[in-house]
Structure formats: C-alpha cells, structure tokens
Image: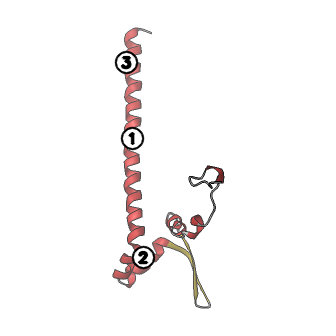
C-alpha cells in the first residue's frame, strides 16, 4: 500500500469515529431531556391529577399504575417503570433508619 492510500484510510476511520462520538453525544442529550420530563411529571403528578377532569385522571392512572385490583374496598396496585423507583424512593423510612455500614469511620467519634 502506498502512503496516500493509508492516509485516506486513516482519515476515513477518523471521520467514522467522530460520527460515532457525535451520535453518542446526541443520544445522551435526548436521554437527559427525557429523564428531566419524567422527573417533572412525578413531581407535579398530584397537582396534575387534582386539576384534571375524569378522563385525564384515568389516563394518568393508566400511565403510572398496573395490576390494579380492589379487594374488600382496599385498592391494590403496582407502579410501572420508572415510577416504581420514585415511589420507593419517597419512602424515607427505608434508607434513613439503617445504621452506618462502616461504624469505625464515622465523623463523630466517642471521646474516652
């Protein structure tokens, strides 16, 4: 192979790599924008539910919940993804009540 053909191949590879990098960058921006919209929806869900009419409430519940049943007047349901993560994360008792995993490295140490 000549130096010219190797140079052309190198430029072609570099161009392809730059195209791949740009595609990943654009995908990350889209991912972050979608995540931001989902977080806003979860924060404003109660306000949206209260303000909306019966049909929009129905659509909102279909979007967030699944496996809905009513047993002796008590509703049972599961959250669809990604709302399940937010519902579990709002239960602060899960993570606040546990003790330190490494008690030897606490900031406040007993003075003897």
Name the residue rendered at 58%, 87% in the picture.
Answer: 74
In front: label 2 or label 3: 2
**Residue at the extreme front:** 112
Quadrant location of the N terminus in the rendered image: top left
| Residue to which mark 3 is pinned | 8
The percent position of residue 110, horizontal first and vertical second, equals 62, 55
Disc 1 vs disc 3: which is toward the camera?
Answer: 1
Q: CA distance from mark 2 to mark 1?
A: 34 Å
| Residue highlighted by disc 1 | 23
Quarter of the image holding residue 33?
bottom left
C-alpha distance separating marks 1 and 3: 23 Å
Tell me the SS state at disc 2.
helix
User: What crowding class fits label 2: few (fewer than 14 Cα within 10 Å), some (14-19), or many (20 or more)?
Assistant: few
Q: Position of residue 10 (x, y in %)?
A: 40, 20
Question: Which quadrant would residue 39 be assigned to in this image?
Answer: bottom left
Which residue lies under the disc numbered 2?
59
Distance, label 2 to label 3, CA atoms, is 56 Å
Q: The residue tagged with tag 3: helix, strand or loop?
A: helix
Is residue 52 something one can see in this rendering? Answer: no
Label 1 vs 3, first from the N-terminus: 3
Of marks 2 and 1, which one's residue comes earlier in the chain? 1
């Amino acid at each position: 192979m000549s130096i010219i053909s190797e140079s052309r191949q190198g430029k072609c590879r570099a161009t392809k790599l730059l195209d791949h990098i740009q595609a990943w960058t654009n995908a990350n921006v889209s991912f972050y924008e979608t995540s931001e919209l989902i977080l806003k929806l979860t924060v404003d869900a109660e306000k949206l539910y209260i303000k909306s009419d019966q049909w929009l409430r129905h659509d909102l519940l279909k979007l967030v919940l699944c496996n809905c049943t009513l047993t002796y007047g008590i509703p049972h349901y599961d959250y669809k993804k990604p709302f399940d993560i937010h519902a579990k994360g709002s239960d602060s008792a899960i993570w606040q009540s546990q003790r330190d995993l490494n008690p030897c490295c606490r900031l406040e140490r007993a003075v003897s």
